[in-house]
Each structure stands twice: as C-alpha cells, then as structure tokens.
Amino acid sequence: MPPIENDATPRTRPSAAGGAGAAPLPRQRGPVRDGGDGSGGPPGEAGPRGVVGRVLRWSAGVLSVLVLATAGAGYLWYDGLNDNLRKEALHLGENKLDSSKPNAAGQTPLNILLLGSDSRNSDENVRLGGSRADRGRPPLADVQMLVHLSADRSNMSVLSIPRDTRVEIPRCTDPDDGAVYRQRVDKINASLQNGGPGCTVATWENLTGIPVDHFMMVDFAGVVSIADAVGGVPVCVDANVHDRRSGLRLEKGETTVRGEQALQWLRTRHGFEDGSDIGRAKAQHLYMSSMVRQLKAGTKLTDVGKLRRLAEEATDALTVDHGLDTVDKLYGLAEELKEVPARRITLATMPWVYSPGGSYVLPKEGDAERVFSMIRRDIALDGEDEGKPAAEPSTEPGTAAPVDPATVTVRVLNGTGTAGQPPVGGRAGTVAAALQTAGFTAAVAEGTPRSRWDTVVSYPQDAQRTEALAVAKALGLPDHAVRQSSGDPGITLTVGADWRTGATFPAASDAPTADGGTGGAGGDEPPENLDGLNGEDASACMRVNPSATW
C-alpha cells in the first residue's frame, strides 16, 4: 500500500477548543496495516502534512443537499435512478444500538450519518483530487457529519467530528468477503478502511452512544456538476483569500461558487482561520447551510432538464444503506427534511481538544458528552427547546398519589452491549433483583436482546409516569431517564452501557460517558463554546487566515 498523506496536521493551534469523495468502486480488500499515525499507512509516517494536488477534502454536507435535490426531481423517478444507487450494509460491528424509541405521540427521531471519502478509484476522482499513486487504496472517510432530525420534525442538528479525532474503532466484519478487522485505536477517518461505511457507523455509535439509522456517502466527482445544476452556492469571506494548495482565490465579500471552484472552497484549510482542519469544517457548514437555503427556496430547481440532470448526478453520486435503497425512500426522507425551518437548523462541531503534541484531536471531556447526550435525548442544539410542548406530563411535587411498588409490573432488559464492548451477562437479573428488594416484587428480567447507551425507564400511558418515576428513584436513576414511549407494552427498564456494574445507578460524577470518560450526561443546554451556525444566518462570513490574503 502506498503511503497515505493528508493535510490535517494543524499549523497553529487555536486558543479555544471548537471543532470540525467518491463512493468507492470495488474496494481493496483485506486487513489494513496500522501505522500508528491514524492514516492507515506504513509505520513511521507520523504527523502527515498536505501538499498541492494531494488529498481533496470537501463537505459531506453536500449529501443532505443531494437528498433535497432528489426530492425536487421526485416526479422523474424511474428504475434507472434506483440502479444508480450503490448499497452497503449499515453496521459492521458486533452490536448495533437499538433505534431511538418513539415519544408519547408515536414520533421517532432520525439519525443519518453523512460521509465523504477521499477515494481515487476513478479517472475523474484522480483528476479532481490528484495523488495518482493513491489510486486503488482503501479510502478514508475524511468528512463525517451526523444529521439528527427531531422526533416532532421541528428542528435539525448537524454535528461534525474532525477526521483526526482519535477513537476506538470496534471490531468489524466485511459482509462481502468475511474479512475481520481487529479492534484498534486510530483516527476516525480510518474506520472506512475496515470493511466500508458500516464500520464508520459502528465507530460513531461506539464513540457517541447515538444510534445511527442510515448513512449516505458521496462521490465527489459528481459535486462539480451538482454545484452547477443548482446554480452555484453563495459563500462569503471577510478578506481577499488565496489558498495556493486548494487553488481557491476569492475577493472579499460574497461570491457564488460553482463547479471546481466549489470544490476548492470545500477543500480549503490553509486559507481559513488558523489554517487547521477545524476552520475547514466551519467553511463546510457555511456552504451546507447556504445550499440548503437555496434548495428550500426552490428558486434553482425549476428547469426540467436541470432537474433530470441533478437527479441523475445525485443518485449516481451516492452510496447508501439498504434502508435507503430507492429513490422513493430518499424522496420521503427529503420531504421530512424540508419541513424543518432554516432557523431551527444548527450546524456544529464536536467540542474537542488537541492531543499532547497536536498530532490528533480528542473529544473535550464533559462538553463532548453533553452534546452527545442532548442528541440521544432528542434535545435541539440551538437551545430553543424550552418553547417546545413537553413530550411528557410534568409531575408537581406533592400531587402524585403514593405508589405501592408491589403493584407495579416492570420488565428489565439488558442493553449493555455496544459496538465496542460485549454485553455484561446477568445485568437484567441483577437489577431486577435490586428492584424486588426495594419492594417491586413484580420486576422480571427478560432475555430480549437490546443495545443502547443510556439507561432508560419507559412507559406507554400518561397514568404510568408516577410509577415509572418510582422505579427510577428506587435505583438512583435521574428523572430525565424516565421517558414516555408509545412503543412499549408496559413499564420497561433497559439497563444501558452507562451502567455495567452494581445494583444502584452510579452518581453523575462517576457514570461512564460514551467518549470514554466519566461525568455522566451534562444538561439540556449546549456548551457555551459550541461553535454552532444557524441555518438561517445568511450573513455568516469565513475569517481568512492573514497568511492567505492578497
């Protein structure tokens, strides 16, 4: 395998933590050599730096745009479009997290992982990205964004994770050839090399505890045509910028970028902010929000020929999981995305810190888990959910009738297995026994397999909330672990991966977090330093790196 070089190593460190393709043709198979530098390349190649014409970086945000574009061309459905779509397995790990449960109204949130790879498996991808020596090597997932669509479809949160985030990549099995890739610690972009996008999904679930319902991965060779088909995308810089590595050259103010100039914007790193990959992630968020505003307005998608071309480009550019394997399904998804008002769309990057030496980044302790927990609990990252009608009725102190625990039937399930760790045997029995000791003599451990991060007590009917709260109190669970769900037949306690030992739920300061630390879930407000961009903000401008002005 030839050396893999990327340009993510920061030139200067920002003062505060913030954060931040081609759908492959047949991949190079077999276990990937681990060089220890997060690149998947040979040993000894630590701290790779970029050069002109090397790995092209661009936004997975284009993926959501492709969905919206396909919706605009919905009336053009035909079998050829379905044939264009490439399909792969959703999850290649050993334990897939259970999907989110429906709320009291029967509404279920949706999580879609958007991926952009640096594949060089076609002539056009090599022409656009350079690096002919990399042709045929397994691609890296250099852009990764999770789109969280709220259960009531009132808001959408888009979370990026920087490609150089060092994570635990779980054991994955390639369903095509049976190759098994060992669990290892590496940069998150290398997860794509362990059998395909399904391993990246498993890695995200392992890191964040957020169940992923679908993935979409895009071929960047189609981005040039797509950017032209929608009439270009308005972007803004606060000074003249010239990034010689990407070729981007713009005057101060707003410019509508098209074709390869759009790719230059999306790959530019050295020209923005401090020259790190984090600035590039912010530029990708700006591009994504601008294009979504255009497509929601519908002003660029009125020409029938342009719509047909866009539908063909969109479907030919995508690799999806089998749950999104037809244009009909993509259209339905797009219709749901279109309902979210731009002002309730938030684009942000996982809170992060540099590792000692700055060769990779890590989730910022506390803040990263707070963001993950908010998404798991379907709380918007824009901080405006306080105005949303409560999904569960509140119980005022002193107003609830006393609960006789002996009359409460509780199903206890073991959900401790995740993509990165096997289930703990006997957990349902241990916790059921603790409930019985506390007087809940009808608590019963069941063998139904589950897999989730957060421990939760769910109940289907309003009248059962008081009983569910009593169950939680008996075990030391916080009130936010009690949730109404129309999908359960009765009060159900699912013991999650955050409670793998003991009969009493650990205190917040001791509870494990999905990113490997402790400290539990945080709160219902995003961290103060979260670099969120509002989807309605048409005034956003990228700050140009002083070394890249002209």
Image (spheres, grey):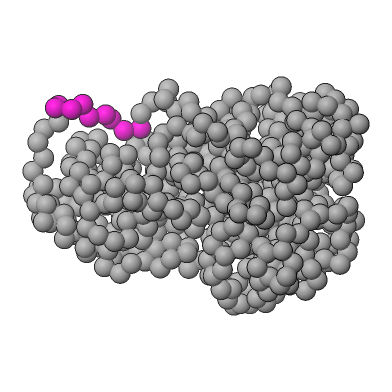
Q: Residue at x 37, y 39 (%)?
A: 103
- Asked whether residue 395 is drawn in magenta, I would say yes
Q: Residue at the spot x=11%, y=56% of the render?
A: 437
Please state, as top left, top right, bottom left or bottom right, where the C terminus lies in the image: top right
Residue 390 percent coordinates (x, y): 35, 28
**Residue 466 to residue 475: above or below:** above
Q: Is residue 265 magenta?
A: no
- Quarter of the picture holding the N terminus: bottom right
Name the residue: 20% across, 43% down: 473
User: Closest to the observer: 392 or 434?
Assistant: 434
Relative side of 458 to 475, left or right: right
Give the tally of numbered discs. Answer: 0
* 378 relative to 21 in the view: left or right: left
Is residue 81 visible in the rendered structure shown here? no
Residue 67 placement: quadrant: top right
- The percent position of residue 273, horizontal first and vertical second, equals 74, 36
In the rendering, at what x and y percent does residue 529 appear? Answer: 55, 33
Tell which of 412 and 6 is nearer to you.
6
Q: Nearer the viewer, residue 142 or 124?
A: 142
Q: Is residue 278 left or right of residue 449?
A: right
- Magenta span: predominant SS is loop
Q: Is residue 217 above or below residue 335?
A: below
Instruction: Give x and y (percent) for residue 532.
Output: 59, 32
Residue 302 vertical placement versus 57 (above, below) = above
The stretch of residues the image draws in magenta is 391-399
Question: Is residue 263 at all visible to an observer of this figure?
Answer: yes
The residue drawn where x is 81% and y is 39% is 271
